[in-house]
Amino acid sequence: MRTTIVLFQQNLRVADNPSLVRAAECGRVVPLFIWDESVGRQPGAASRWWLYKALADLQKNLSRLGTPLILRRGKTAAVLHHILQETGAEVAAWQERCERPIALRDMGIADALRKSGVEVFLDDGFLLFHPTAIRTAAGRPFRVFTPFARACFTAKLPARPLAPPKVLRGIAGLASETLESLNLIPGASAWTKGLAKTWDIRESAAQDKIADFVAQRLTHYADDRDRPDREGTSRLSPYLHYGQISPRQLWHAVQNEKAAGDAAHPSIERYLLELLWREFSWHLLQQFPLVAEKPLNPAFVHFPWRADHVGLEAWQKGLTGYPIVDAGMRQLWQTGWMHNRVRMVVASFLIKHLLIDWRVGEAWFWDTLVDADLGANAASWQWVAGCGADAAPYFRIFNPILQGQKFDPNGDYIRRYVPELAGLTVKYIHTPWLAPVAILAEAGATAYPQPIIEHGFARKRALAALAQAKGLAQNTKPVGHAFPCG
Ligand SMILES: Cc1cc2nc3c(=O)[nH]c(=O)nc-3n(C[C@H](O)[C@H](O)[C@H](O)COP(=O)(O)OP(=O)(O)OC[C@H]3O[C@@H](n4cnc5c(N)ncnc54)[C@H](O)[C@@H]3O)c2cc1C
């Protein structure tokens, strides 16, 4: 009987966990989580809060199967080395990571372990398709989404999800830190209470959410996905980020509906495409490890960003005077999540109306989103800014009034998150500054701020800034970091 150390990182689940399943088949299992702050970008506050809860759930699930989760802190290589010696384990297994510094660290660890006679098993459960598996005809990584998605649809299907092990045999008496001692959460605060009210972070709850989404909402997904006033999307992104569910589980749950001859094909295709956007962003991160730090389009290196602290604070607090923007930013603060359409609107507002560097917005999302994800967040911010791969053109500047009117036509989403506007009728809900004072007073909406910037002025200013950046870019050498893969 062999002993395997199963290192949990972003696969905090017992179902469809190839490393765990294989370890259980081979003999004794030592489930291990290492809190290693030495490499890579550290999770933001909301993400740490989620991690704490997800680890607590994993502890319960593993104990129920027969062996506890061992928590340690320190450098991964050193801790692994130590626990291999303590347990005499012959095998180490983990899920591959895609962030460059962590992937490099893990490759180094795997090499060293193999040299010392430890067998290493790596699984690739974080993505549907391994980044090396989807290539252009010329063998290069894709930079444009549509052909990338086409290649995914014609590639070998992701494997079917695995059932959790029935039982785990462990090793008694191993020392473990307590979850509290990892200091992941800031302690009780009104903010974390809001998050706790919104989310059930158990793996079993995520499975229920998948089943509920497929049964109740998938059919309408194509129509409802852009409507923040409806519960039209799956809200599974944070569970995917920490691997409490695998993308394969989702892919197959949705594909099964298709196989069952369901009439909702446009919605199914649409949903699979969204899952592929997640893949695409991680494939991009493989090509451009600095995607969170540098614009992929060199013209943006010279963009004349403004240091507007007042505007930034109004944006962060949901006090810009544009109801759809403010509703989104308050949803983010209260729940740690924001609807995708509104993410695009608020990001566009920060970048184009306020001319604040997209990296400032990316960092705020990184700290406050429970689904903050290096691949998806950075790629999406670059996409909105117009400087990313296959990005929205820079001159597409969302009009926050029209976006609100189109995607929240009755203002229900706004009323939910901006209660001071709850008494306004549809006529003024997207443009409260146009409402007569008497109507504002009657609706109790007088405290709501005036717009911090006028839309027409902001649009012209943004376009002029882009022209200026392009002019500067033409007079300078191209930057070396862009498109390094050639
Ligand atoms: C500025 C900005 C920042 C973003 N930051 C993040 C982030 O940090 N983490 C994150 O997971 N997503 C991010 N997204 C993408 C998207 O908004 C979320 O994935 C989505 O809102 C999650 O909600 P859902 O699970 O209900 O999505 P659904 O519509 O149910 O989609 C299913 C899954 O597909 C994936 N997905 C959907 N849309 C996208 C997309 N545009 N890009 C990448 N993956 C996608 C997600 O994993 C999602 O859970 C960002 C988008 C923008 C515009």
Image (cartoon, helix red, strand yellow):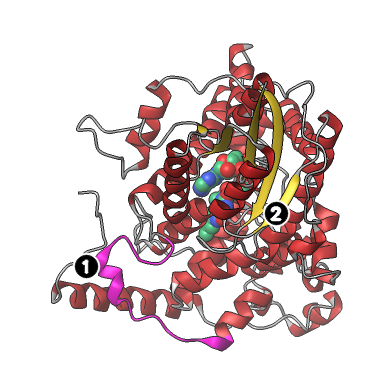
Residue designated by label 1: 479
The disc label shown at residue 72, or none: 2
Mark 2 is surrounded, within 10 Å at the Cα level, by few (under 14), some (14 to 19) or many (20 or more) other residues, namely many
Q: Is residue 476 above or below residue 230?
A: below
Residue 222 drawn in magenta: no
- Left/right of residue 422 with respect to residue 435 in the rendered view: right
- Helix, strand, or loop for circle 1? loop
Q: Residues at badges 2 and 1 in contact (C-beta under 8 Å)?
A: no
Residue 308 drawn in magenta: yes
> Percent position (x, y) of residue 68?
80, 40
Asked where in the image residue 167 lies, by quadrant, the reply is top right
> Percent position (x, y) of residue 109?
47, 46
Number of numbered callouts drawn: 2
Amino acid type at image mark 2 = Arg
From this viewpoint, is residue 235 visible? Answer: no
Distance of label 2 from label 1 (alpha carbons): 42 Å
- Left/right of residue 63 with respect to residue 42 in the rendered view: right
Q: Is residue 134 above or below residue 307?
A: above
Residue pictured at 76% horizontal, 43% vertical: 69
> Percent position (x, y) of residue 99?
46, 51
Q: Write down the region rendered in magenta.
A: 292-310
Front-most of residues 334 and 418: 334
Q: Nearer the viewer, mark 2 or mark 1?
A: 2
Front-most of residues 291 and 60: 60
From this viewpoint, is residue 143 visible? Answer: yes
Front-most of residues 389 and 123: 123
